[in-house]
Image (spheres, helix red, strand yellow):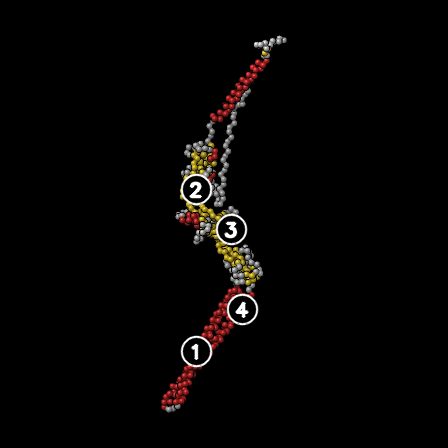
Amino acid sequence: MKVREPFTGEGGHAISTLPTSRRRTKSMFHVVGCLLVVAFASLSAGCKEAPKATARPPEQVKVTSVVQKDVPIYAEWVGTTVGYVTAQIRARVSGYLISQNYKEGTVVKAGALLFQIDPRQYQNAVNQAKAQLGTAESQLAQAKAAVATAEADVTRAEANQKKTALEVDRYRPLAGRGSVSQQELDNTVQANEANLASVEATRANVVNAKAGVTKAQAEIARARASLDEAELNLSWTKVTSAVDGIAGIKNVDIGDLIATSTVMTTVSKVNPIYVQVGVAEQEYLRWRQRPVAADEIDRKSDLQITLSDGSIYPHRGTAEIVDRQVGVTTGTISVRGVFPNPGDLLRPGQFARVRAVVDLKKGALLVPQRAVRELQGNYEVGVVSADESVDVRKVQVGDRVGSLWIIAQGLKPGERVIVEGLDKVKAGEKVKAMPADPEPAAPMGRSTPAAAPPTPAAPAPQSTAPPARSPRK
């Protein structure tokens, strides 16, 4: 084997040729690596630019038309139920309670016995009044007998006077002829005058006797009044219901001393029943002053209530009573509506939300609430124009009506607004408009169902370019 002599450089130093070979090999690998990087970059650029060659299809959105129609505007207040007639049952006489004669919480009729107070002292008063009446009646009989006696005395006195008057008339001519003495004539005249005085006296006795009759009759009237009062007090020991209705829980127990100021229980008539609310002065004026056309909803007979469990009461009511004044401290006026209450479902004191028509918006523009997007206190909607491009507009909203929203400014009747997919498109972008499903009717007192979430976007298409190959060494 031939050994290569080392190469001698300047100065006599030997220089090895092995590092130079290695350096050449390393440079070659660098060149190959750069070529591979350029190849991979070219392939990657070709794969990325492939989707740009295909245009993106229009985004699909759901739209609905802006509706224009007359819309009643409702207001809602918190109220409580009040008995149509509420009677506090009090005793009219005092005494000890001896019995309860009704079942609490049940329906009672007017005049039904509820309680019984001890009647014995009042029965004694009735007996005394009857005795006094009997005494007065006997005194009247005696007075009438005295009148009869006095009248008989008058008749007898008048007869005696007539007799003496005749004797005087007969004796006068005789005394003039001397047939009788003057003394006999004088005696006859005096007897006649005495009889005249007796007649007057007996007549005065008759008047006095008749006065006794009048007094006795007055005593009878007083005795009868006392008897009536005693019998009335006796009847009031039976405490009865004043009205038809539901009797409440008793406030007294057997053995209690009942006073006339004691409220023993309460009876309420609940069919029909009142619902009372406090209406703000501004709302009251808005409700009463707006003119109503013949074809509009009757505001006074279109009250609805929602109960505390969220259920809607099936019967509508009528506003019948408006209080005489506005509350000085609250600024509200009390209004009572009357509602039918078959089955006595509603009871006094229940909570209820009352809903009523307070206005009518003529030609209002309506869109679904889910079509309106709120952004930093501003409201905007997406409008699809005739060329299928999106126009994002700011709008001014009004009252909510069920699942719809009144648009006061920014839209026109018949324009198409996006109800689903607004978040996936931009202003000026072309879209594929599809009709949206009709809005569900939102029941009174219930929230409108939330809009369906937007359909997720389709995944990006996968690249079909083959992977880059490494160059052969």
Query: Of marks 1 and 3, which one's residue comes earlier in the chain?
Result: 1
For label 4, the residue is 127
> Gap in Å between the C-alphas at discs 4 and 1?
38 Å
Q: Is residue 28 above or below residue 84?
A: above
Mark closer to the observer (4, 2): 2
Of circles 4 and 1, which is in front? 1
User: Amino acid type of disc 4?
Assistant: Asn
Mark 1 lies on a secondary structure that is: helix
SS state under label 3: loop
- Number of residues whose C-alpha sits closer than 10 Å to that of mark 3, classed few (under 14), some (14–19) or many (20 or more): few
Crowd around label 4: few <14 · some 14–19 · many ≥20 (10 Å) = some
Which residue in the protein does label 3 denote?
350
**Which of the two labelled residues, at mark 4 and mark 1, occupies the earlier sequence position?**
4
Specify whether 126 is left or right of 367.
Answer: right
- Residue 110 picture location, percent across and down: 51, 59
Q: Is residue 330 above or below residue 132?
A: above
Residue 339 in sight here: no
Q: Quadrant of the C terminus?
A: top right
**Which residue is under mark 2?**
398
Assign the N terminus to one quadrant of the image.
Answer: top right
